[in-house]
Image: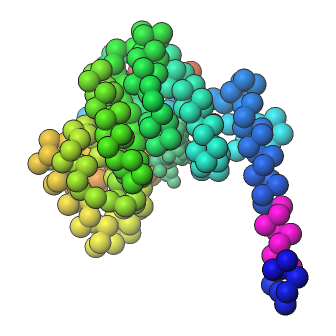
């Protein structure tokens, strides 16, 4: 009824909104069957030690090759999966598949798995991790769980408890995209993260000599060191950026310069090769 009253603007925008909602609904119903239809796969991106440039871990990044929608980017379907709770079964598949691949790599190379708040807050998240580890045979020490600051916004107490359970198994935890969310330093005091991942936006800013970005990276590195945590710089794209980041004291580097996200078979080759030397270009 509101739209009948005086609203030229409403009429103009409504068809677009409608089409968007319809598109979303279609995407959702396709996503519901993506796991069963075997449309999901994992890519793995190397993370290297800033000094030796040897691979220390790979981050598992999910991909969706949809029959109806073609290749859908995670930035598009992960938020949808979170809103619809489909992230719970999808996340479980990611965890199991990541462990299954990582067990093929030489020890001690780790796999890092992104875990959404919805998934972490689900009762039995830790048992899901236990099953993924025991079914694959991957030692807990070789699994890292990545979470973002956003998990502490809704139910900090439960999130913290779930992460403590995961750590008690022997897994490590990393704080992803640091500095982009509702940063509060309280949880850095409460939880022993092994790694703080400095968001790509700061790395790109520093590469353009932004004094703010440089100051923030320096501060995060110093804070991490005194908390006995390591740092990973995300989104390092060339040799100059890698050198800058290393000189700033970041422990690890991830980015296109050292390797794009790649299929499991390629990651296995690089993992094997990294035993004997560095992987970089
Ligand atoms: P993220 O966890 O911060 O992952 C890093 C993203 O940065 C990846 O995007 C990666 O491809 C991209 N990236 C890495 N190096 C560079 C670089 O040098 N330059 C640029 N421009 N980009 C770089 P991707 O794979 O599109 O994933 C986007 C986000 O989707 C991830 O951000 C993560 O938040 C989410 N995601 C991906 N896989 C999963 C998953 O299995 N579960 C959950 N819950 N979220 C996931
Ligand atoms: Mg991540
Ligand atoms: Mg990140
Ligand atoms: Mg990100």
Of residues 280 and 182, the one nearer the viewer is 182
Q: Quadrant of the C terminus?
A: top left
Report the side of 67 relative to 116 (left or right).
right
Is residue 51 visible in the rendered image? The answer is: no
Of residues 114 and 280, the one nearer the viewer is 114
Residue drawn 40% across the image and 59% down it: 181
173 to 156, vertically: above or below: above
Residue drawn 40% across the image and 42% down it: 147
Residue drawn 83% across the image and 72% down it: 14
Q: Position of residue 136 (x, y in %)?
A: 47, 11
Instruction: Give the quadrant of residue 173.
Output: top left
Report the side of 106 relative to 244 (left or right).
right
274 to 117, vertically: above or below: above
Residue drawn 81% across the image and 76% down it: 13
Main SS of the magenta part reads: helix
Magenta residue span: 10-19
Of residues 135 and 238, the one nearer the viewer is 135
Protein image colouring: rainbow
- Outermost residue toward the bottom in this view: 6
151 to 219, vertically: above or below: above
Q: Position of residue 37 (x, y in %)?
A: 75, 25
Q: Quadrant of the N terminus?
A: bottom right
In this rendering, the count of numbered labels is: 0
Of residues 272 and 213, the one nearer the viewer is 213
Q: Position of residue 25 (x, y in %)?
A: 78, 49
Instruction: Give the quadrant of residue 20.
Output: bottom right
């Amino acid at each position: 009824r509101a739209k009948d009253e005086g609203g030229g603007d409403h009429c103009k925008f409504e068809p677009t909104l409608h089409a968007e909602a319809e598109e979303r609904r279609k995407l959702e119903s396709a996503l519901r069957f993506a796991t069963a239809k075997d449309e999901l796969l994992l890519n793995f991106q190397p993370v290297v030690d800033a000094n030796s440039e040897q691979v220390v871990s790979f981050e598992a990044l999910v991909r969706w090759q949809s029959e109806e929608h073609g290749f859908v980017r995670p930035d598009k379907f992960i938020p949808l999966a979170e809103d619809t709770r489909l992230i719970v079964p999808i996340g479980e598949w990611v965890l199991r598949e990541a462990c299954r691949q990582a067990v093929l790599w030489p020890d001690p190379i780790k796999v890092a798995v992104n875990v959404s708040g919805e998934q972490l807050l689900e009762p039995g998240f830790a048992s899901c991790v236990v099953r993924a580890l025991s079914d694959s045979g991957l030692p807990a020490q070789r699994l890292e769980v990545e979470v973002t600051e956003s998990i502490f916004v809704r139910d900090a107490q439960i999130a913290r408890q779930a992460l403590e359970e995961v750590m008690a198994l022997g897994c490590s935890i990393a704080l992803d995209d640091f500095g982009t969310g509702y940063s509060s330093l309280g949880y850095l005091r409460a939880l022993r993260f092994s790694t703080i991942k400095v968001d790509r936006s700061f790395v790109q800013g520093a590469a353009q000599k932004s004094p703010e970005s440089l100051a923030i990276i320096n501060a995060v590195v110093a804070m991490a060191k005194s908390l006995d945590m390591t740092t990973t710089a995300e989104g390092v794209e060339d040799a100059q950026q890698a050198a800058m980041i290393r000189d700033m004291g970041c422990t690890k580097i991830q980015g296109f310069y050292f390797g794009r996200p790649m299929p499991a078979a390629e990651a296995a080759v690089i993992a094997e090769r990294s035993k004997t030397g560095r992987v970089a270009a």
